[in-house]
Image (spheres, coloured by chain):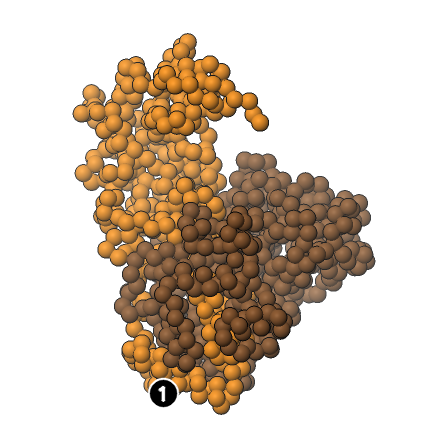
Amino acid sequence: MAGLAATFGSGAMTNSIDELEYTDLILATGTNTTENHPVIGMKVKRAVKQHGAKLIVIDPREIDLVKYADIWLRQKPGTDVAVFNGLIHVIIAENLYAKEYVAERTEGFDALKAVVARYTPEYVEKISGVPSEDLKKAARMYAQAKRASIIYAMGITQHISGTDNVKSTANLSMLCGNVGIEGGGVNPLRGQNNVQGACDMGALPNVFPAYQQVANEDARKRFEAAWGANLSPKPGLTLMEIMAAAGKGTIKALYIMGENPLLSDPDLHHVKKELQKLDLMIVQDIFMTETAQIADVVLPVTSFAEKDGTFTNTERRVQRVRKAIEAPGEAKTDWEVICGIANKMGYPMHYASAREIFNEITTVTPSYAGISYERLEKEGIQWPCPTSEHQGTKFLHKDKFSRGLGLFTAIEFIPPDELPDKEYPFLLTTGRVLYHYHTGTMTKRAQGLSERCPESLVEINPIDADKLGIAEGQTVKVASRRGKVEAKACVTQKSAPGTIFMNFHFTDTPVNLLTNPALDPTGKIPEYKVCAVKLEAA
Amino acid sequence: MEKKITVTIDGQEVPATPGQTILECAGAIGIFIPTLCHYQNTTHVGACRVCVVEVENARSLVASCCMPVTPGMVVRTNTPAVRAAQKMIVELLWSAGDHNCLTCEQNGQCELQNLVYWLQIDKPRFNIEPPGFAPDNSNTMIHRDLNKCILCGRCIRACNEIQVNEVLDFAMRSSQAKVGPAFDADYIDSSCVFCGECLQACPTGAITFKQAKFAGRPWELSKVRTTCAYCGVGCQMDLYTKDNKIVKVMGNREYGQPNGGSLCVKGRFGMDFVSHPDRLKKPLIRYKKSEDLKEATWDEAYAFIADKLKAVKKTNGPDSIAGLSSARVTNEENYLFQKFMRAAIGTNNVDHCARL
């Protein structure tokens, strides 16, 4: 979310889920919404079918939403910046942008204008494969909508140009005056239940809760006083850097709470080797995950149904989690375990309940300051909520951006790190399917979900299937420079010719053996959405 | 401000706004009018007619769920003619199906059963002639027994208007009329995505939560509101539990944002993992790299971890230790985790998998 933080001053969904249903236009890119956020997908479909909203889909896959779209731009994977620059080019060339808004509320427009000048629809067509006429139509439709909302997900961010892609969506939105209004905005749809909360709480190497920089002396002093400890001013390592440092031997001990990097990280062979070099690996989870199996200590914890607490959803809404049943065996809540270790190490942590921890959070997290369990009883509250009288914030950047002026970023297109060539002629893109979730530790144990989707599939276009003599349901070998897996073929128009799609839910088809660990230089997100592979019938 | 009008319902004057239905106005002052096919936030269809009322100067009884109020309208909801019509309708519905409460999962929360009781009907005056449809046992999530269907169409509107999945519609005619996917397919062979909105909308036992069958009567279940643990939407849901197990998951339209009572297949049918036998139940320690993990007590685990972490910190410094927090656990736990890494260990090496 570094992209949005840099341009607006805040890295969260600008607007609310409910606004999508009543806006005039939705631009969905890099989000297979109906499968990965079905309830948001439902609202998008209602907006189109019942409230007359227009829908533009920009996606290499023929996802379900394409059926409802007014315009579908099928770009080659990894060419998003070119497409967005093209849209911006047309809007500026045809004088359709919000001049007053751009003049009063933004900066950096001239630099943007200079860079997009050469992204003519014809040039963009050459890079992305999007027909120039469709690009023009989409640009006009977006610019002419009174209120337009952009939604995106990992299809935008999991590229080496991920941060650039996000900034591109922000450029387009600001250009047409769509940030800071109801029904508008740039809206990242978070894939996991509490990504937003984990970020808000400072589970990031460079910030304390509420994005207060660890390098900022004032912030550090405040937290030193609140926590009674000396704190390091040096930003820490990101997940991918931690893995690399473990391999090099500079990280000796790793404490993992509720993550399964041995199925979710790119280039898995490598990750396993790195983790095995650790002196101490602690894993705290509800199941014996792939990662837990190689740990030195495995700690059993409670699931969401067995504890109290809060999650913060993708629209910044803080909501209660309530205990419904008792935990199995000796499992404890994650927070009890953290306290247990801290106390043993001589740093006292004593809390009687999740509510007590939440009360402490509100004293050091200004955006949560006005929230309490009492107020969350009936309905969640969207941060920022600075005081106990404040109603919460439906959409951000009204009248003024968090950083003052909205910042346009002039961005040049760079191609993906690894593109198909003679030896590896297909482009592999990865994602989730409706019936499963992330590394599948939860969904694969559900009878109904497994019945609908028991195994991993390779989605391949009929033209390619024909060429390679691959039939529906036949086992296919897929190999990249880093590894190989096997899965059954699903022959479908959803995949463009030359591109295959696989999900990463299944242990026996670990797609992340294939993926490219090349990172976005700012967001440090691996390029899961593009790598080169070859395939053959097994 | 829209202009207000006044109507009279059962002798009470009620302020109303033009466009409001009689049903809505009556509800606003606490007058109960029974309904079956009416389903909030979907088209008013007026199909079942149990909501009929008398309107002065109207030609016949009118369906209150569809009829907009007009200035000076005089409405009566509890006249002998109204009750006679309601009884007739309910008896016809009863006799046209296999409404055997002894074996029905909806017993105790069935809207048809409630109405039979409220109208004080002993038995229908017609012969009971169920259509004899085979049940849809095609999957482990949604059970369909169309012999208990009253053709109210709520599932169809839930599917098409709320979820916009466009799977269900009416098919066939007369006594063979039924609701279902195209080509009379079972759910598993249709384009159904198993969101379960239909079973939540069904007023009878026609569409039910399969895994909840024989797992507990409605009055034996406890209900706890919580937030779904799957994607970032954060749907509000009710977990129904019995004997320390989740029996079923339902949306609740009273909870408002962000999901207005709707759920998806994962939230509704993906909770088996909670009580799965694979759950970890005891701490495990691998004392030597060459050994297997062995069961231990919490005290042993805490001591083992604290000793090792202290040793690593002493020899290699706090920045040789790193922690991965989680986008799956609560805010409280994320907060404590980073506090632990920063204050107790002394490093900022803390991240989570937001990027993956």
Q: Splitting the image into 4 quarters, where does residue A44 fall?
A: top right
Q: Residue at x 31, y 30 (%)?
A: B150
Where residue A349 appears, as percent x and y from the top left, is 41, 72
Seen in the picture, residue A243 relative to B252 is either above or below; the reply is below
Of residues B96 and B285, the one drawn nearer to the viewer in this rendering: B285
Of residues A255 and A249, the one drawn nearer to the viewer in this rendering: A255
Q: Residue at x 61, y 44 (%)?
A: A183
Question: What residue would you read off at disc 1?
Answer: B288
Q: Is residue A326 visible?
A: yes
Where residue B183 appears, as percent x and y from the top left, is 40, 37
Where residue B154 appears, as percent x and y from the top left, is 39, 34
Q: Residue at x 74, y 51 (%)?
A: A105
B251 lies left or right of A119: left
Say what amino acid the circle numbered 1 marks: Lys
Q: Residue at x 20, y 40 (%)?
A: B103
A147 lies left or right of A300: right
As drawn, the chain in brown is A
A190 lies left or right of A129: left
What's the colour of chain B in the image?
A: orange
Where residue A61 appears, as percent x and y from the top left, is 57, 54
A125 lies left or right of B157: right
Q: Is residue A535 visible?
A: no
Seen in the picture, residue A164 relative to A380 is either above or below; the reply is below
